[in-house]
């Protein structure tokens, strides 16, 4: 099942630089692993903002919630989830 996810990162201004760097490094490793596993299908930076737009391919909302809530930056992100289904006019056979 595909989900469009927008994540807006809001790190507290008083978060120490070392803590922020460590969180970002852990987040990067987790994101790379999930992409290699095929669960995080697209990851795009929103131009001009500390935010991303992503497409996840997971079994359903429960798995998505487990993934998102396990992200190191989860406590510092506003997340909006939109479930997707196939568009009848799409020419891409792999759209699910
Ligand atoms: O930078 C972000 O958009 C937040 C988060 C998502 C993937 C990642 O590596 O960090």
Image (cartoon, helix red, strand yellow):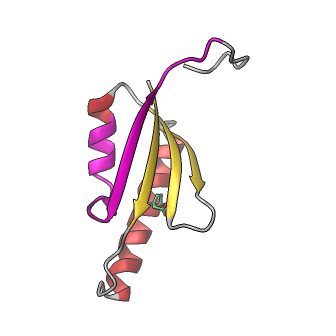
Which residue is nearer to you in this view: 88 or 35?
88
Q: Position of residue 5 (x, y in %)?
A: 45, 43
Check the image and report above or below for 4 versus 11: above
**Residue located 63% across and 20% down the image:** 94
Image coordinates of residue 16 in percent, x first then y, are: 31, 88
- Which range is magenta? 64-88
* Residue 91 horizontal side relative to residue 22, left or right: right
In the image, what residue occupies the spot 63% across and 11% down? 88
Q: Is residue 93 above or below residue 49?
A: above
Q: Position of residue 19 (x, y in %)?
A: 32, 81
> Measuring 56% from the left and 17% from the top, which residue is drawn there?
86
Residue at the spot 36% in from the left edge and 86% down from the top edge: 18
Q: How many marks?
A: 0
Does 61 lie within the magenta span? no
User: Height in image: 89 above or below 36?
Assistant: above
Q: Residue furthest top?
A: 88
Name the image quarter holding the N terminus: top left
Q: Residue furthest right?
A: 91
Left or right of 49 on screen, residue 30: left
Q: Which quarter shows the C terminus?
A: top right
Find residue 7 and report its image quarter. bottom left
Question: Percent from the top left, x then y, of residue 73?
Answer: 34, 63
């Amino acid at each position: 099942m595909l989900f469009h996810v927008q994540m807006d990162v809001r790190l507290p201004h008083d978060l120490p630089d070392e803590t922020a760097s460590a969180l970002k490094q852990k987040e990067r490793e987790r994101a790379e692993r999930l992409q290699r596993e095929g669960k995080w299908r697209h990851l795009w930076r929103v131009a001009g903002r500390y935010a991303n737009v992503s497409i996840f391919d997971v079994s359903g909302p429960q798995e998505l919630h487990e993934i998102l809530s396990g992200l190191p930056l989860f406590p510092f992100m506003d997340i909006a989830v939109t479930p997707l289904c196939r568009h009848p006019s799409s020419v891409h056979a792999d759209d699910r």
